[in-house]
Amino acid sequence: MARRQHHYKRNKTNTYEIDVTTFLNLMVVLIPFLLITAVFSRLTIVELNLPSNAGGAAPQHENFRVEVIVREPGIEISNGTAVIATVPKKDGEYDLEALSEMMVTLKQEYPNVDEASVLMERLIPYDYLIRVMDTVRTVEVPTNVENEYELYALFSEISVGDAP
């Protein structure tokens, strides 16, 4: 009986090798480039204190706590129990300049207090939260050089939450 050719029989062909030289050359150039440019890209992150369910006692500094409540008619500044001042809207926009002046006044009265809470009503756009937080955190003071400003810290430890 003659042997049949089996269909699984391997063909005796040449095997080819993959040339990775060009790929390695690309990696030698690309990796240092990515490492060098990664140094120049920075992210600015603001640490926030979010309210928790634990509830614990809030730290007391001079028995004063700054609360900035953003409502539809305007901005209220509170000490945690009573409203200190109200900044109404000006031409349909929140008056952040007046808020900044109030924050500077409060910081002068209570220089050791760094904590502040920014409380928002639910329907206020997110952009106003960022703008109010920036106003509460820092103030721009003009320098002697024309068109130059310096930033000074006001209430740098910000907590955010929903308005009562």
Image (cartoon, rainbow, N blue to C red):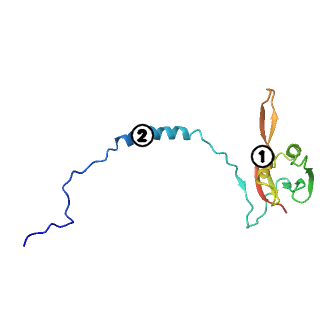
* Visible residue check, residue 139: yes
Q: Quadrant of the N terminus?
A: bottom left
Farthest top residue in view: 145
Specify whether 101 is left or right of 26: right
Specify whether 113 is left or right of 12: right
Please tell me whether residue 144 is drawn above or below residue 133 in the rendered image: above
Q: For the residue carrying disc 1, how many other residues have a C-alpha within 10 Å: few (<14), some (14-19), or many (20+)? A: some
Specify whether 151 is left or right of 81: left
Please tell me whether residue 33 is drawn above or below residue 58 in the rendered image: above
Q: Nearer the viewer, mark 2 or mark 1?
A: 2
* Nearer-the-camera pick, 17 or 53: 17
Residue found 17% across the figure and 67% down from its top: 6
Please tell me whether residue 102 is drawn above or below residue 145 in the rendered image: below
Number of numbered labels in the structure image: 2
Residue found 20% across the figure and 53% down from its top: 13
* Visible residue check, residue 66: no
Under mark 1, the amino acid is Asp
Residue that badge 2 annotates: 26
Q: Position of residue 31 (x, y in %)?
A: 46, 41
Q: Position of residue 158 (x, y in %)?
A: 76, 52
Under mark 2, the amino acid is Leu
The residues tagged by marks 2 and 1 sit, at their Cα atoms, a distance apart of 44 Å
Task: Look at the numbered disc 2 and give the secondary structure of its residue.
Answer: helix
Q: Position of residue 80 (x, y in %)?
A: 87, 58
Please tell me whether residue 50 is drawn above or below residue 113 in the rendered image: below
* Nearer-the-camera pick, 101 or 73: 73
Residue that badge 1 annotates: 134
